[in-house]
Amino acid sequence: SLRGLAGFFTDYLWFDSLSQGDTFGRLLTARVIPALVFTVIFFAILLANLVIADRLAPKLRPMNAPTPEDELVSRYQQTTARYRGRIRVGIAVFFALIAGIGVSSQWQQWILFTHRVDFGKKDPQFHKDVGFYVFRLPFLTFVFDWLFAGLIIVLIVTAIAHYLNGGIRLQSPFQRVTPQVKAHLSVILGLMALVKTAQYF
């Protein structure tokens, strides 16, 4: 927005008036680099799962007594068949930007994490240097929380992709979810459990 650009330029002028232009550049880097890295990571994770969802799509859908759900999915597949790759990339970029841009607000934790020092004193329970809790733990906690929230988004988007590919049929009287889809979604749920468990170690 124009207000954001005006605030950014005002900050730059203030730092420059104090002959601290280099400091402003380092602060800007501390905001941009984590956001860029996390955006790329989320993009790669989501795009990989969308590609897998397309690979696991059933080749044929029984159409003896097509339901409105079958007709909707078939119409979607016919409409998007030529642009499926672009749609995958577009969806991955959209959600990656949402998940990654917010990371820039954690620039203070990032600076502490990348400039960590030891205090030379260990805590009596876990025998870790006190500097770990001051410099590293805040950012590591954010990373685990971000990963867990990101995997929730990946799970939802992937489930929708499986639905549009025909792997999930809510109105089917028989098999509503194919074994391949169950395995795929179970892997994502397992990763979520692993991230949550690792957070406490």
Image (cartoon, rainbow, N blue to C red):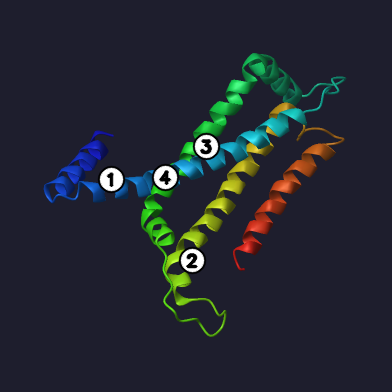
Return the residue at label 1. Answer: 25
Instruction: Check disc 3 and give the amino acid type.
Output: Phe
Tell me which label, 1 or 2, sits earlier in the chain.
Answer: 1
**C-alpha span from label 3 to label 2:** 27 Å
Name which residue type carries label 1: Gly
Quadrant where the image shows the C terminus:
bottom right
Q: Would you name the residue on which mark 2 appears?
A: 137
Dot 4 corresponds to which residue?
A: 33
Where does residue 111 sit, x and y in percent of width and height? 38, 57
Q: Is residue 94 left or right of residue 87?
A: left
Q: Nearer the viewer, residue 175 or 45?
A: 45
Q: Residue at x 75, y 42 (%)?
A: 184
| Residue at disc 1, secondary structure | helix
Q: Residue at x 64, y 17 (%)?
A: 80
Q: What secondary structure is marked by label 4?
A: helix
Compared to 185, does 195 lie above or below?
Answer: below
Image quadrant where one finds the N terminus: top left
Q: Residues within 10 Å of mark 2 (few under 14, many from 20)?
A: some
Q: Position of residue 36 (x, y in %)?
A: 45, 41
Task: Identify the amino acid type marked 4.
Answer: Ile
Labels 4, 3: front one: 4
Tag 3–tag 2 contact (CB < 8 Å): no
The residue at which mark 3 appears reads as: 95
Going from N to C along the chain, the mark reached first, 2 or 4, is 4
Residue 78 shown left or right of residue 38 in the figure: right
Q: Secondary structure at mark 3?
A: helix
Res 101 quadrant in image: top left
Q: Is residue 115 above or below residue 67?
A: below
